[in-house]
Amino acid sequence: MAISNVAIAEVAPASAPHVVLGRKTAKKKRVIGVGGWILRIGLTVLFLFPILFMFVSSLKPDQQIFGDLSSIAAFLPIGNISMDNYAAVFDRVPAARFLVNSIGISAITVAAGILVNSLAAFALSRMRVRGKTIILTLIIATLIVPFETLALPLVWWVNQLPSFELTEFGFMFTKGWIDTYQVQIIPFVANAFSIYLFHQYFESIPKELDEAARMDGAGWFRIYRQVVMPLSGPAIATVAILTFLPAWNSYLWPLMVVQTEELRPVMVGVQYFFQLNVSWGEVMAYSTLITLPVVALFIAFQRSFVNSIASSGVKG
Amino acid sequence: MRHAKKRLIVASLLATSLVATMAGCASGGASGSDGKNGELTIWTHNGGNTEELAAVQAIVDGYNKSQSETTVKLQAFPQASYNDSVIAAAASGKLPCIVDIDGPNVPNWAWAKYLTPLDLSVDLDENLPSTLGIWNGETYSVGYYDVALAMFARKSVLAEHGIRVATIDEPWTQEEFGDALKALKADGTWKNPLDIGTGDVGEWYPYAYSPLLQSFGGDLINRDDFQSADGVLNGPEALEWAEWMQSLATEGYIATKSGADSALDFQNNVTAIQYGGSWAAANNAAALGDDLAVMPSVDLGEGTKIGGGSWQWGVTTGCANPEAAMDYLSYSLSPENIAAVAVATATIPATDAAAALVPGFEEGGNLAIFREFSANSAVLRPETPAYPFIATEFTKATQDIINGGDPQDTLDAAVAAIDANIKSNGGYTQK
Amino acid sequence: MTTTIERPPAVPAAGGPARPIRRKRDRTSKTENLAGLAMLTPAVLLLALFIFVPAILAFGLAFTNARLISPYPAVFVGLDNFVRLFADAAFFRALLNVAYFAVVVVPLQAGLALVMAILVNKKVRGTTFFRTVYFLPVVTSMVVVSLLWLFMYRQDGLINVIIDRVTFGLVTGPDWLNDTATSMPAIILMSVWQGVGFHMIIWLSGLQTIPADLYEAADLDGVTAWQRFRYITWPGLSATRSLILVTITIQALSLFTQISVMTQGGPLNSTTTVVYEAVESGFAQQETGYASAISLVFFVIVLLISVVQRFLSREKA
């Protein structure tokens, strides 16, 4: 499970050209170059057009979508263009509520995840805690277990957990986390891979820094907060993205544990469209709606996204 | 170091077991909180059905006006996710006092202790038997209406192809039906002349197709003791049914996945015969007028059979004020109320007194035929807590058969799964 | 195993060169130990609650008739669930489907991803644009991708229309998702489309580990492009290769979303998967005991794959 020592920043296209062209091979290189361009453009069509098709179809009534299929118009926003499908989505589906839920759940999971996992990693990296080797080993060991293997026993388990509920007489215990916000957040806060990433990163921050701070009388928490975390921007970004994507995209879990409409996130909202009389334009509008936030984030923080995904490959 | 490690592990284990114990304690009382402070909540499945929802809301409003002790509140869910919502609420002890429930699920919900036996001030003997949910000798639910299955066709189309209009006394036989489909298919007007609603997965499959199985002489489960499906769901009669269903698809008489709205397709002459529910009758009649023929289902050997049992009301075990809930239900069962809902939903009123108030259901009325269908040929789906499991297995098996799966193997697999489920649940005999 | 994140900037140690540190060892290490434990507790407790406990539960529940929600206590039923599982044709079909998926997807996705990685590793105009486009499906949710392709795979959908146009009406496309022969290939094609960008990035980081001077030396020797690939690139990617093999295999085993949205396992179980079967029995039918048995078998398979992969990569190292 090893990927060699590489800084993904180098993946950026700015990396130095490896190839020094010899004259003899120049012509051959050109042929390969042309083939490369054909491939590049072909692949662009392959990856871009379906997404374009989704977006364009979301602006058309069904009849026109099917009418346009056999020409390039399928990928162009021309003809009878309107936001009607979007209006219909908000009308038919509590889409706004789903969006708010997903944003809230993702944001809290990301924030809590950064805090909890970096604290643990800090202790494991910086402090002399008894038994930390075994703890770290145990944490790393959980990485090989895909979530799907645990999902079913976990559903049963969260249904046994107690939940507090405020009542007029103070609070009471109720049984089960099914159908709550917490069941969509708390199980995903602690993450072994995030701890691992933070740990690796903290190890690379010179320890002399905290020794110096300690000399100045700083406590451990202050070192964490004022010395280590401010230097850990890239690690925080990576963990944030790697926590955000599965939180936003989660489908299997909320499908099982959340039934009440007001608590559901965006992805399970698609179930609405499998009831009768589906209009494809509306389905495409809803799909576009729940994809745009992520694509916008991706374009804005492209490099961080790519770096995060690259580092998640280590997980195996 | 080693010592500390142990201590940490012990501490974690303690913390974990503490949470587990708390969970254990909490699981003892899954009591809900609805019914307190003079408030009562009702959940209903008809989130997408405005007519029915309005009719029920009218009853609720009437009740709230009639007395001052209890305020009843109605909450509607989309039908597709209604059952899952109830199960989730049951898990977290958040069930309301009164729930809407599909008839065949009553034994399961009673067995799972979601429902408490009814104790009403009205006489339920007046109700059509298929509008009552009875299990282990107790009545757990009551409905305002029942529905029926029928064959819809155009009289003109039937006449043109030399097909007679079937009647209650003389329904189509298997052979007659086969000839009719052959003639219609040969005409070439319809890609698939018959629509039996194969695109509508969910409860439609057992509701509509298990009566066909029963008409062949098979069944979903052996009803002597409800312990096994062996021999009835995979016996020779069931095999005959499966092969017949498959032939409908292979001959091109039905689509393996029908359109989104069977009634609409029928009205638009996309299909020639619709096998559908009585609730489609009004729209079909409006579209076709006198040309519409409403006929009983086919007699496949053991007489015509149709499904019985639709949506009903029950009171939950966690309700803090069951008396109020019973009082509301008793109020809601007046003939006027039942009639109002039946009119709104185009369904069969549960009592004679209510039927007398609904135009069309009087003697000789154009809807009276459905009451006759119900009275003559309704078969309840098996009254066992295993029903929800049987229903999903049956749905899957039927889909596989229609899609060309080996009939005997598919039925055997369904029987094995059903029997294993019943065995794993100790025969569903706990009380 | 080292991190792949950029290193922090070198920060000069405050307070000049490190001085010998004197402190009261005993007292500090005790508070240090306690503070450390306090920082570890939230994460450790949560991991214990939501990973270790469910894992142990999977073992325990698999031998009972536990139901998701039931007023009756679970009863120990021995190996009943496993007997039932190994007699369940749908489960074997699920294993077969997952294996089919893996066997096709591993070479297809890994191969295509490698080609793409090599393409975007070259410094040419617009590389950032191409990389962004190839990566776009990866950030698109699988649910959305499934909906989109569900639409395109219709009998009268985009893909069949294109097939019709390209072949001048000679070939009529199948009803992709409703035909047992084409349903799994259709799911595979879509999954590759969605996932290939991910593995492109993994290959890319592998490519970066190959020292540039190897290529320079090769170029001086005037080798062909194929030789460069065969003798430098390919051997240089051995660690990445086994990594990609494992991620794709586990991705195949965990196949669920596409199935749930597009085919619900059908037609005729031709697309059912291990996770789909587990969810159907453990959630839809509430048979937690049986679903735990499925999860346990799944777990064992994942473990075996990890062990085999470890063994293989150790041999090479």
Image (tube, coloured by chain):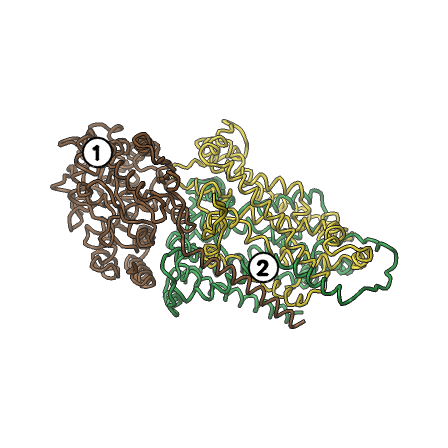
Chain colours: A yellow, B brown, C green
In the depicted view, which residue is nearer to us: C65 or B69?
A: B69
Mark 1 closeness class: few <14, some 14–19, many ≥20 residues within 10 Å: many
Left or right, C246 with respect to C161, comes to: right
In the depicted view, which residue is nearer to us: B150 or A217?
A: A217
Query: At numbered mark 2, what does the secondary structure look like: helix, strand or loop?
Result: helix
Question: x, y percentage for residue C2?
Answer: 70, 61
- Amino acid carrying label 1: it is Pro
Question: x, y percentage for residue B320?
Answer: 36, 45
Q: CA distance from mark 1 to mark 2?
A: 59 Å
Query: At numbered mark 1, what does the secondary structure look like: helix, strand or loop?
Result: helix
Question: x, y percentage for residue B288?
Answer: 24, 29
Mark 2 closeness class: few <14, some 14–19, many ≥20 residues within 10 Å: some
- Amino acid carrying label 2: it is Leu
Q: Please, which chain is the residue tagged with disc 2 on?
A: C
In the depicted view, which residue is nearer to us: A79 or A117?
A: A117
Give the residue at mark 2: C45
